[in-house]
Image (tube, rainbow, N blue to C red):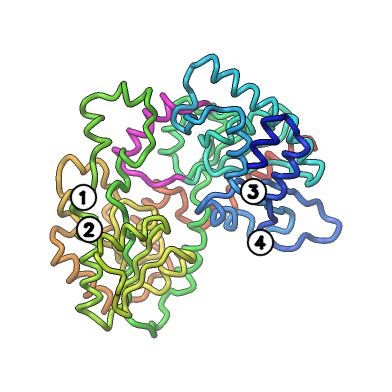
Amino acid sequence: MLLRWSARIRLPRWTSSLLLHETKLLKIGNAPRRGSEVFDLLAMRKPGFEEDLQAIFGSTQDVRIWGIRHRAIKAVASAFLPASTADNNYARSDQNFSRAKCRCRAYWRRVWPALARRVPFRGALAANHAYWAEQELAGAMESRGVPFIALHKESFKSTGFYDFCERLTAEGRAPFQGRLILVYCEKERQVQLAAGVAAPEKILVSGMPRMDLVHQRRRQHAARTVSRPPTILFFAFTADAGLPGRLEIPTHLQERLSPLERELVQMRWEILTPQLLQMMLQIARDNPNVQVIMRAKKPDIPKICQWLGTTEFPDNFHITHEGDLADLLAVSDVACGLASTALVEAIAFGLPTYRPSFAEAGEAAFQPYVPDYGGLVEVVDTPTELARRLVEQALRQQPVPSELTPAATTFLREAIGNPDGEAGSRARASILQEIQRSPR
């Protein structure tokens, strides 16, 4: 790749030109007012991150967001760092690795001014504090007084997954070199503080910005007369969803895992996942008057079809990975899932929600990895009963409430820091404060 080559032979102007070729102005925010000051920010593009950026800056006129492909940043970093480098082994104490990181950071210090001369970037935004390819860019920018801010998009987790992540973060991830980390909830903040990621004043809770749209849609749809087919929304998941085995465990940490932890990384929803997928397809076949929408991540769809054993589906069965989740919630009557932030969004929308408690989800060993939804999700013990209740609830087509119950409000505040639809405003204020007090 040309970017990697330009970095290897130390051509910072070429590198900056190639980086700009991988950058585009995102359709976020309104046209700037004539004569007003505009802040240009560089955002590292990642799935789900742009929804948060839209919620933060979508109503502003004084910010322009430029998105750069994450692979471009990786290409530059990989010119200096070994191929084995990963998010979860960046903290290793190896002299050769430390020297490589210093060379990478020094090169970014030369690239950034050339980049900023072409577009006057006032700061950069990332989706996680721990992405290995961005570590030395953050350090280089901060050494030049330019804010590098992480909007930590990873959010709702089970107690068991939080505990495992805390150890992984403490032992494998390097301290944050940037200016500020914004997290969704206090629990995530405490995990990062315990792991020594950054000082307390550098980690703030703003809430989950993209949840703002869910609150907005709920209020718009409250008490509306429903004039569409009854619809079930299912949040599909793979066999390792929400389990330690989903994480990339570096070799040096694998060697220090206890026998129990080695068992944990082997855990899978081997029975539950295909059972639920096939159950949803059967619901569609048995109830042609009910729409079944299966929301999945794009890379997971081939495996889902493999579990289903077919790609020939009835007209009322749909698998989708596109569109805003708030729009899907607005055309659904009931939601079902297991360990997913999407299920939290369904709660915020006011939909009746269900989760299974059979197969592995009913076993004691898996309970730490089933999130606590504050008693707001109905728990069902058998596939037959779950299918019956989903169809029954869909047929009711009850309107969503304009305002949430006190229990739901409390849960959303604790789980994702957004009980009010104002997380975007909080995040925007924190970001702009850092940008405005930094010298040009």
For label 1, the residue is: 270
Magenta range: 154-175
Q: Is residue 241 left or right of residue 321?
A: left
Q: CA distance from mark 4 to mark 3?
A: 13 Å
The part of the image, by quadrant, that contains residue 171 is top left
Q: Is residue 171 magenta?
A: yes
Quick check: 393 left or right of 350?
left
**Is the Cβ of the residue at disc 2 closer than 8 Å to that at disc 1?**
yes
Residue 200 tag number: none
Give the residue pinned by disc 3. 68
> Which comes before the other along the chain, label 3 or label 1?
3
Contact, CB < 8 Å: mark 3 with mark 1? no
Give the amino acid at mark 3. Ile
Q: Quadrant of residue 28?
A: bottom right
For the residue pair 432 and 314, the one nearer the viewer reads as 314
Three-letter amino acid code at the position of disc 1: Glu
CB under 8 Å between discs 2 and 3: no
Q: Residue furthest top?
A: 95
The dot on residue 27 is 4
Residue that numbered label 2 is attached to: 274
Report helix, strand or loop for mark 4. Answer: loop
Q: Is residue 251 above or below residue 279?
A: above
Which residue is depicted at the point 64% across and 27% down? Answer: 104
Q: Of the residues tagged 4 and 1, which is closer to the observer?
A: 1
Is disc 1 placed on a helix, strand or loop? loop
